[in-house]
Image (tube, rainbow, N blue to C red):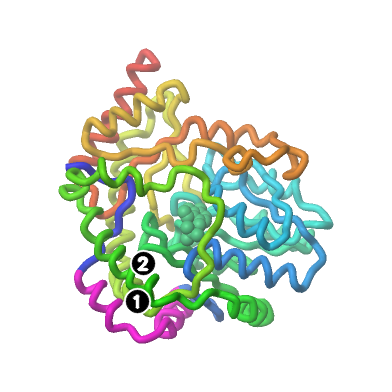
Amino acid sequence: MRVPSAGVPITAADLFRGLTERDTVRLRDEFVRFLDVSHVGLTGTGCAAFFLILRALAARSDRTEVVLPAYTAPVVLLPVQQAGLRPVFADVSLDTFNLDPASAADRLGRNTLAVMPAHMFGIPCELEELGRACEAAGAALVEDAASAFGAKLNGRAVGAIGDAGFYSFHRGKQMTSVTGGAWATDDPDLAEAIEAEAAALDRTPLRRRAGLLARTFALSLVVRPRIYGLLHPLLAGYKDTAPHDDFEFHAYTALQAGVIRSMLGRLDAIIEARNTRARRARAILENTEGIILPDVPEGAEPVFNHCPLLVPAELRDRCISAGLDTGVECTILYGTTVYGAYNLDGASCGGHDCRRAAELADRLVLVPCHPLVPMDKLEQAAEAIRNTVRRGTGQ
Ligand SMILES: Cc1ncc(COP(=O)(O)O)c(C=O)c1O
């Protein structure tokens, strides 16, 4: 048995709903109700949703800069660049592992079109101070809730709090249709502009739809720890570790909408399974010298996508191996800042001085906490990491 780093259980009922779903309208309407937001649209990827939002914002402004956290999924750089905009990086906080609102506020200027905080690992990012700073500067607040569908901040769904937000249904998220994304906004004018941009999404060719069905079925099998244990040497080649040089710009399909509608019906149970595991791992890892766990802000209801922690950089490889020895695939995630992943030159992106993001990239370890992680395995992996840090720091 080997527990994959990411996994969403995909059931026969999910697949059946996918096969029988006729369009994407019902899912869109269910999201409107679930997120309590007036406008939602579906896209083939989270990046496509972000791109549409940026294009719509850029169409009504001559501002050209987008402030991004220096540590997040590097691929978010591509929609910014492809929309003809300039990324400017702000630092993250080592207390929350999310965008540092003070650093982001520092980067705001007369040319800032938008600021994009990310709710990393399913942990809501504080938005109050940042929202005020954006408003004062006339910049839009666009939430990256790619890994945080279902999380809340002060009772409101993340991704639906700022001027606009987006979600991902890529295979590592709370719910998955292999790929997929959505945008949300309460601003009717912005929604209309995004819809107009969405007309450019590629209608998915039949061949790709058949491929999606095959991939969904394959994914439903390989995320199971027993099957993954047998197949993981073969699967290594399919994992995307190099930075992407493009993102998919397809329309969402009825098949995918059906799968997600079916999962949405049990999202509460998925979230509970994740949060129970993350709480258990955090209880084992907390109060260990050398280990830092992110604070969850007051008023936040996270949906832990992983259990993230920082360990001393020189012990990280040993921690990953110790986790693997227990049969649990712990990971380092991206291992670099966004500007590092794409070798951006400092002058083009507001400088390379995001030291905390670089430290996070060097020290981060993710313990998987998806519903397919057996609780005893999770405990063994967390204990193995804790003991590795204790030994390594002479405790
Ligand atoms: C924080 C974050 N933002 C954006 C994305 C991009 O989403 P997608 O892969 O659906 O384009 C991801 C996906 O990994 C992510 O984790």
Residue 343 screen position, x and y as percent:
64, 38
In the picture, measured across the screen, residue 259 lies left or right of residue 97, that is: left
User: What kind of residue is marked 1?
Assistant: Leu
Q: Does the magenta stretch include residue 292?
A: no
User: What kind of residue is marked 2?
Assistant: Ser
In the picture, measured across the screen, residue 264 lies left or right of residue 96, that is: left
Which secondary structure type mostly characterizes the magenta part of the structure? Answer: helix
Residue shown at the point (66%, 66%) measured from the top left: 54
Residue 31 screen position, x and y as percent:
44, 76
Residue 312 screen position, x and y as percent:
45, 24
In the rendered image, which residue does mark 2 sit on?
Answer: 177
Vertical relation: 351 (above or below) 220: above
Query: Residue furthest toward the top?
Result: 394
Q: Distance between the residues labelled 2 and 1?
A: 8 Å
Q: Which mark is residue 255?
A: 1
Q: Tag 2, which secondary structure?
A: loop
Q: Does the magenta stretch include residue 26?
A: yes
Query: In front here: 120 or 19?
Result: 19
Q: Are the residues tagged 2 and 1 within 8 Å (C-beta)?
A: yes
Ranked by sequence position, the earlier of labels 2 and 1 is 2
Query: Residue furthest toward the front?
Result: 207
Q: Give the residues drawn in magenta, as a range.
A: 12-34
Query: In front here: 85 or 65?
Result: 85
Residue 149 screen position, x and y as percent:
44, 63
Q: Residues within 10 Å of mark 1 (few under 14, many from 20)?
A: many
